[in-house]
Image (cartoon, rainbow, N blue to C red):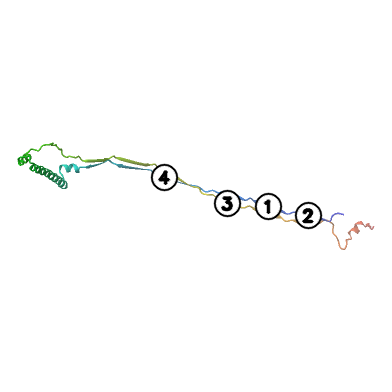
Amino acid sequence: MKPLLQIKTIPLKYELKIQRAELKYNSSKSDVLAKNQKGSLEIQNRPSKLSLDTFNARNSVCPTTMTSVRQAADSGLEAAMEATANYAKEGAILLDPNISNPLDVINQQRAQMPTGEFGMRFLPTTGPDIEWSEPDMDMKYQTDKLSFDIKVAKGDYEFIPGNVEVSITQMPDVEIEYIGEPLYVPPSARDFFEHAPIDILA
C-alpha cells in the first residue's frame, strides 16, 4: 500500500547581525605657550667723593669771633698767671733782708729784655681735613629667559556597546500533501468496472 500523505517540514530561517562593542579614543591637541622675558642691565656708578674741611686752616689765619674771644680769654688768663708770678717774685725781693735796694733790682728786672726761644710760625698752622672715598661700580646683568608652558589635553573615551540583531526570514512550517487516490463516500464503482469482463454485443 502506497503512502497517502507526504509531509514536508520547513525549517526556521533567520539572519544574525552582530555589531561588536568598541572603545574609541578621541585625542585632542596640546597647547604650548612660550613666554619670553627680556634680560636687563643695571649699572650703578658711585664716583669718588672728596670731603675738604678748611675750617681749622681758615680759623688759624683769620679766626672767627668765637675763636677770637676764646683766644683772648686764654691769653688773658695766661697774662694774669704770669703777672701773679711776677708780683710774687717782686714781693719776695722786697721781703728779702739781704737785698739792700730791692726797688732797683725790681726795676732792672722789668727793664730787662725778654729772653728765651722765639719760634717762627707759619700760617695757616693746620692744613685742611681731607677725606675721600673710592669710586665703586655695580653691574647687574640678567640674561633673557624663555619659559614653556605645556598644557596636555586629556582625550575622551567613548564606549559603543555591542548589538545583536536577529531577523527571521522564514517561519517554520509543516506542509502535508495527500498523494493517494480520491476517496468516495459512498465508495466509487470504478473498481468494479475496471475488473469486470466487458461483453461486446454483436
The mark that comes first in sequence, 1 or 3, is: 1
Residue 68, x across and y down, in percent: 15, 46
Classify mark 2: helix, strand or loop: strand
Q: Amino acid at mark 2?
A: Lys
| Residue identified by numbered label 1 | 16
Q: Amino acid at mark 4?
A: Asn
As drawn, is 59 to the left or to the right of 159? left
Q: Identify which residue is drawn at 31% across, 40% down.
A: 136
| Residue identified by numbered label 4 | 36
* Camera-nearest label, 1 or 4: 4
| Residue identified by numbered label 3 | 158
Distance from disc 2 to disc 3, alpha carbons, whole Å, reads 50 Å
- Can you tell which quarter of the image residue 56 is in? top left
The mark that comes first in sequence, 2 or 1, is: 2
Residue 129, x across and y down, in percent: 22, 41
Distance from disc 1 to disc 4, alpha carbons, whole Å, reads 63 Å
